[in-house]
Amino acid sequence: MNPITTIPSSMLAPCGMNCGVCMAFLRTKNRCVGCNSNLPDKPPHCHVCSIKTCDNKPGIASFCFECEKFPCRRLKNLDKRYRGKYRMSMIDNLINIKALGLEKFMETENARWVCQACGNPVCVHNGKCYSCGSQYEVHKKYENHEN
């Protein structure tokens, strides 16, 4: 049985980014608190994120898939970059959250981004486990997303 991380669903950003596997969250120095946090030490760029602060969402949407413009140009551009560089698709994440539900999606995420050596999260950006130092290959082309 593979170990499973324990990233909470509160670490999922409206765009579908799993902040629990982000380099900015996993590092110890100048650690980010995640997109959904309202703490004052949240990085300034998160407060002004054009996706999180989007005014096209009807009411207060939790995730971008709840918007009638999903997927918008901004999300498509972000998704393209992450598929190409980091082997993750925010659009696929959002589609899966909608189809599976948040709890089941988090089960798959916690199994996907786990360090096989220690069971802690592996960084989507560089494949590093910040807990034990193990390194994993993550910079392969994302193959499961159809445009």
Image (tube, helix red, strand yellow):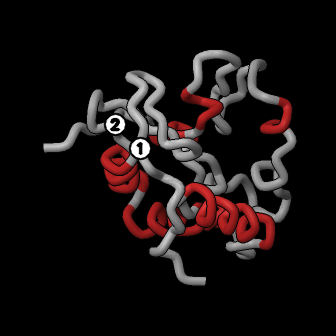
Number of marks in the rendered image: 2
Q: Nearer the viewer, mark 2 or mark 1?
A: 1
Q: Secondary structure at mark 2?
A: loop
- Horizontal side of residue 80 vs 49, given as left or right: left
Which numbered circle lies on residue 136? Answer: 1
Q: Earlier in the sequence, mark 2 or mark 1?
A: 2
Closer to us: 125 or 14: 125
Which residue is at 74% across, 57% downward?
59
Give the labeled residue for mark 2. Answer: 115
Q: Which residue corresponds to the image point at 39% horizontal and 31% vertical from the top-left?
A: 134
Seen at 45% across and 74% down, the residue is: 144
Write the residue at 59% across / 65% down: 83
Q: Position of residue 80 (x, y in %)?
A: 68, 68
Q: What amino acid type should be assigned to the residue bearing mark 2? A: Cys
Amino acid tagged 1: Tyr
Of all residues, the one furthest to the bottom in this rendering is 147
Residue 110 x, y percent position in the rendering: 35, 44
As helix, strand or loop, the secondary structure at mark 1 comes to loop
